[in-house]
Image (spheres, rainbow, N blue to C red):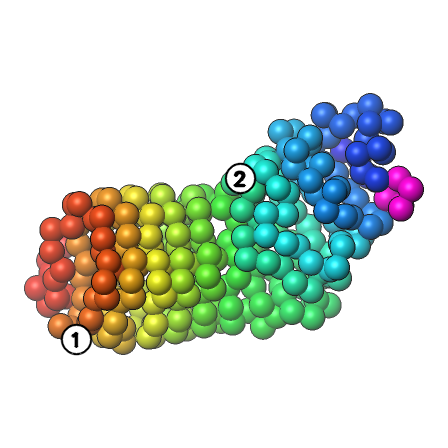
Amino acid sequence: MEIAVNLTPEIRLEQALIEAGIENVVTKLTVAGNLTKDDFRYIGKTMGKTLRELDMSDATIEKNTLKAKTFYQPCGLTAITIPDSVDHIYLKAFNDCPVLNSITIRSSSKHPKCSSENGILFNKDKTELLYCPAGRKGDYLIPDSVKTIKSDAFAHSNLSTITIPNSVTEIEPYAFYECERLTSVVIPDSVTKIGIGTFSGCSNLTTVTIPDSVNEIDANVFFECYRLTNIIRNTTLIKFKAYSYYDCPALEEIRERSNYKK
């Protein structure tokens, strides 16, 4: 069931849906008016099992901010539309949305800081990839405008292949944290920095290729990559910091690319 609700200080989301007798059967909710933290808590706690689409295009969100763990507990949302007025989205704002496929900003051209493309969040000029919804599956080609993959950008993603273009120069900490379906990664020559814990918890990752441009691997980058068997590097100059490949029981060797045969 789809429903549109206009909230006021006197009428909150819980009250509006209870009075209508439909709180547990709504699959798509369009909200206008002021959304508070109590409304978000109600969405996650009571509507989380049935609600799939949340359109907040015409809503005003408290302090124009989506905080960490916006919905307070896991919910089944697959698509979210954010109003132009939101000017700050916290890291891990959508951590409670494990099947989320798409995040759309109502009008990317009007938003002062962020933009969306094909359901993925970027900064205004698309030089930073901010967040890819965890519920996306299959393959994804990062746009060649992107220079930085931000912290937790692909955390908990269900993607099996992620192609990193030559425009990317920095991969921030935990960018691919617990991407459990990811099996291999080729890091392009443009990348110069890989942050702490970048691939930690990627339990099905088997092969990683590191270019000449990266001369140091930070701590915990491959922590708990249980199936990682090969780290292929182009030179012997790469330094591995403490615990960079800790708890990788299947790791056989770290090879130079010239000695690696597929």
Q: Position of residue 142 (x, y in %)?
A: 45, 61
The residue beneath circle 2 is 99
Q: Amino acid at mark 2?
A: Val
Q: Residue at x 73, y 68 (%)?
A: 110
Residue 196 lies in the magenta-colored region: no
Q: Label 1 vs label 2: CA separation?
A: 41 Å
Are dots 1 and 2 in contact, CB under 8 Å? no
Q: Quadrant of residue 105?
A: bottom right
Q: Is residue 118 above or below residue 136?
A: below
Extreme residue in the left direction: 259
**Position of 29 relative to 32 (above/below):** above
Count the numbered circles shown.
2
Q: Residue at x 45, y 72 (%)?
A: 147
Which residue is pictured at 62% across the width and 64% down the height? 115
Give the main secondary structure, helix, strand or loop, of the magenta stretch. Answer: loop
Which mark identifies residue 237? 1
Magenta range is 7-11
- The label nearer to you, 1 versus 2, is 1
Residue 9 part of the magenta-drawn span: yes
Q: Position of residue 186 (x, y in %)?
A: 29, 61
As displayed, is residue 122 above or below residue 38?
below
Identity, as a three-letter code, of the amino acid under mark 1: Leu
Asked where in the image residue 166 lies, by quadrant, the reply is bottom left
Residue 169 x/y as whole percent: 39, 73
Residue 261 picture location, percent across and down:
10, 58
Q: Is residue 164 visible?
A: no
Q: Residue furthest front?
A: 242
Q: Nearer the viewer, residue 124 or 89?
A: 89
Please tell me whether mark 1 sits on a helix, a strand or a loop.
loop
Secondary structure of the residue carrying numbered label 2: loop
